[in-house]
Image: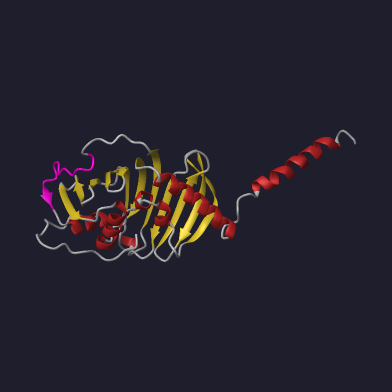
Amino acid sequence: MHTYFRPMLLAWAVLTLAAPACSRDPQPGTPAAAAEGERLMRQMSDTLAKVPAFRFSTSESLDTVGPPSQRQVLRFSRTVTVRRPDAMYFELHGVPGTKLDVIVYYDGRTVSLRDDVDRVWAQTTVPATLDQMLDDVARRYSLPVPIGDVVYSVPYEAFIGRHTKGGFVGRETIDGTACARLAYTDEFVDVGVWIPTSGQPLPRRVTLVYKRAPGAPGARIDFTSWDLSPQIADGTFRFTPGGAATQVAFEDLTARLLSGGRVPGPAATGQETPGGATPR
């Protein structure tokens, strides 16, 4: 064989060997893509489901509810502490341009919101587990909790319903982290999930579009840190009004937060008025 053919032959052999590696990812919309999405989602779900407590931080954006012409985009950071099966605490802090400082307590009996911008607080009685509580506030107050799907006891079942379709759609790098990108849809919501391809299979990003809410608002959550064995101080989940001395109705405070407006007024005594139904 002539020596000048050898480099060409070697290059052809390398390309031939590399071709299968480039084609390992399934084509979006195929059964193989659905199966790969299933595998990755169950991996993520199993990792979260087996830990009794965890903490994570996020950088988020959330569209306010209403017509697109009147919509605002709230941008904030969030730190969440979860202790299964019946406790959660998180803080929301607005970035420049978003006036937001809210602390949320769940202690297995009540959910309490403390708004340090308007110096008000609200409280409602809820069921005794995280799963039931998240469903309850969504149903009664039309209150989307974008981080809720990773908090449920089985995150897979929160993300993937009986009528959900989708799976693997490609790969993306987020702030230097190589991720598999998954996309799912049902009649209520479109969901995107980015899961790292190495290390712990914990979500790096989640996007949601609430298709049945007015104006189809969306949310984007970038997970900036995860701790699956956090040290949790005594009293973390115990509500304290702090400087928020005025109580308002729970539905009024949640409606204000969703619209980006002001709290309508002080709480009235008596029966709470439940909100409309929402699936998540």
Outermost right residue: 1
In which quadrant of the rendered image does the N terminus lie? top right
Q: How many marks?
A: 0
On the image, the x and y values in percent for residue 165 come to 49, 62
Q: Residue at x 37, y 62 (%)?
A: 216
On the image, the x and y values in percent for residue 238 come to 19, 43
Q: Residue at x 22, y 36 (%)?
A: 234
Q: Residue at x 23, y 43 (%)?
A: 237
Closer-to-camera residue (179/5): 179
| Magenta span | 236-247
Image side of residue 215 versus residue 173, left or right: left
The picture quadrant where one finds residue 229 is: top left
Report if residue 203 is visible in the image: no
Image side of residue 215 versus residue 156, left or right: left
On the image, the x and y values in percent for residue 115 come to 20, 47
Outermost left residue: 269
On the image, the x and y values in percent for residue 103 come to 23, 45
The magenta stretch spans residue 73:
no
In which quadrant of the rendered image does the C terminus lie? bottom left
Closer-to-camera residue (59/96): 59
Report if residue 256 is visible in the image: yes
Q: How is the protein colored in the picture?
A: secondary structure
Q: Main secondary structure of the magenta part?
A: loop
